[in-house]
């Protein structure tokens, strides 16, 4: 019996089918490889270095876009009162934060209620350079925010994020620290509630109690969460993962703290929002199809070579 010619209709149809499958798979592989977020960091002014309005040499009160409009503002961010609060927030500019006149006190900033300063353990008045626990810059070398966390004085720090993809996980990273307003005498708790639209997470917590950074889970020598009177808890980084539900959503940092009247102070810096490193199921599936199609294309070319030799 004669061998079937490579040019029979059945063989031609099979070859065309294999070729089309292979090419389709390669396109899918290319699509999977090129799929990436439009920008690595979706946050604008995450170092808080772009400002408008008037600040002192070391910083000053932040405009709450509500009943306090005398301070400066952060570009791309909104600082808002919470539930009718008299929101109290400040921006510390890069530079020496230690007081040159009062031991144990950080430099005074001008805000909505006049001068404001935070306990600065280890500060010695008149030393050169002056300063104690309060850092001169954020961990990334920029400016940082301090905000009252007590109910009635807390604030929401917000930015609208665009170019998100619904169903994709995003990682929000930031540094936070904790302190207390100078001249008050109670132990305090501090923390941030972070939300992307309606999904919220909170920095270190135990039950209803807000803890400070991970290394300061409890007041030394006690089982009480929080920060001892007059203390300062230095920076720790936190990363929270949120899944977007639409292309545009609001990222909010809400300052929290207890007790009211002994101002617990939350610090915030170096905010970024990046696509989660976990691969998306769609991309993984498309890549798998592409690899399989490369194998099919290799087999198709090898088959054509054998048929050419046989003829």
Image (cartoon, grey):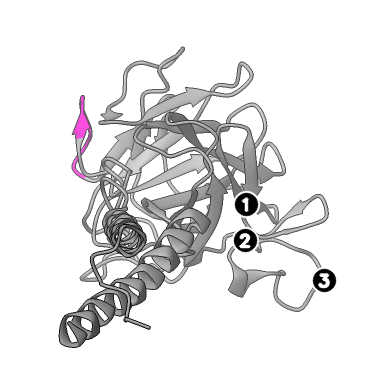
Q: Residue at x 23, y 80 (%)?
A: 307
Q: Quadrant of the C terminus?
A: bottom left
Q: Quadrant of residue 217?
A: bottom right
Mark number for residue 212? 2
In the shown orientation, is residue 13 left or right of residue 311?
right
**Residue 197: x percent and y percent?**
56, 32
In the rendered image, residue 149, in percent from the top left (x then y), is placed at: 60, 40
Q: Is residue 1 above or below residue 42?
A: below
Task: Give the image location of residue 272, x and y in percent.
Answer: 36, 52
Region of the chain picked out in magenta, as a range: 51-57
Label 2 neighbour load within 10 Å: few <14, some 14-19, many 20+: many
Callout 3–callout 2 Cβ contact below 8 Å: no
In the image, residue 48 lies at what x, y percent?
A: 28, 44
Task: State the residue in front, 307 or 52.
Answer: 307
Numbered tag placed on residue 190 in the rendering: 1
Query: Label 3, on which residue?
Result: 223
Lower position in the chain sequence, tag 3 or tag 2: 2
Per the model, the C-alpha gap separating discs 1 and 3 is 16 Å
- Magenta span: predominant SS is loop
Give the answer, above or below, for where 61 lies relative to 174.
Answer: above
Residue 56 in magenta? yes
* Marks 2 and 1 close (CB-CB < 8 Å): yes
SS at mark 1?
strand
> Circle 3 — which element?
loop
Report the residue that reaches farthest toward the top.
Answer: 67
């Amino acid at each position: 019996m004669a061998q079937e010619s490579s040019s029979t209709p059945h063989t031609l149809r099979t070859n065309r089918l294999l070729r089309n499958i292979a090419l389709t798979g390669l396109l899918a592989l290319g699509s999977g490889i090129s799929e990436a977020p439009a920008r690595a960091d979706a946050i604008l002014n995450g170092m808080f270095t772009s400002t408008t309005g008037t600040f002192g040499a070391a910083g000053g009160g932040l405009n709450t876009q509500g009943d306090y409009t005398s301070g400066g503002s952060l570009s791309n961010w909104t600082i808002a009162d919470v539930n009718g609060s008299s929101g109290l927030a400040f921006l510390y500019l890069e530079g020496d934060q230690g007081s040159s006149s009062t031991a144990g006190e950080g430099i005074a900033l001008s805000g909505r209620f006049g001068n404001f300063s935070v306990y600065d353990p280890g500060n010695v008045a008149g030393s050169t350079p002056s300063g104690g626990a309060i850092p001169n810059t954020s961990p990334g070398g920029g400016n940082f925010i301090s905000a009252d966390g007590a109910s009635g004085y807390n604030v929401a720090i917000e930015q609208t994020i665009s170019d998100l993809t619904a169903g994709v996980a995003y990682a929000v990273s930031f540094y936070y620290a904790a302190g207390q307003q100078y001249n008050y005498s109670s132990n305090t708790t501090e923390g941030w509630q972070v939300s992307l639209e309606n999904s919220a997470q909170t920095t270190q917590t135990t039950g209803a109690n807000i803890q400070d950074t991970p290394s300061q889970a409890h007041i030394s020598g006690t089982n009480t969460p929080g920060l001892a009177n007059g203390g300062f808890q230095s920076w720790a980084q936190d990363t929270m993962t949120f899944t977007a539900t639409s292309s545009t959503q609001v990222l909010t940092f809400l300052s929290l703290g207890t007790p009211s009247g002994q101002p617990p102070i939350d610090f915030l810096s170096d905010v970024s929002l990046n696509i989660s490193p976990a691969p998306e199921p769609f991309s993984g599936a498309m890549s798998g199809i592409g690899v399989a199609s490369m194998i099919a294309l290799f087999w198709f070319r090898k088959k054509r070579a054998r048929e050419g030799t046989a003829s």
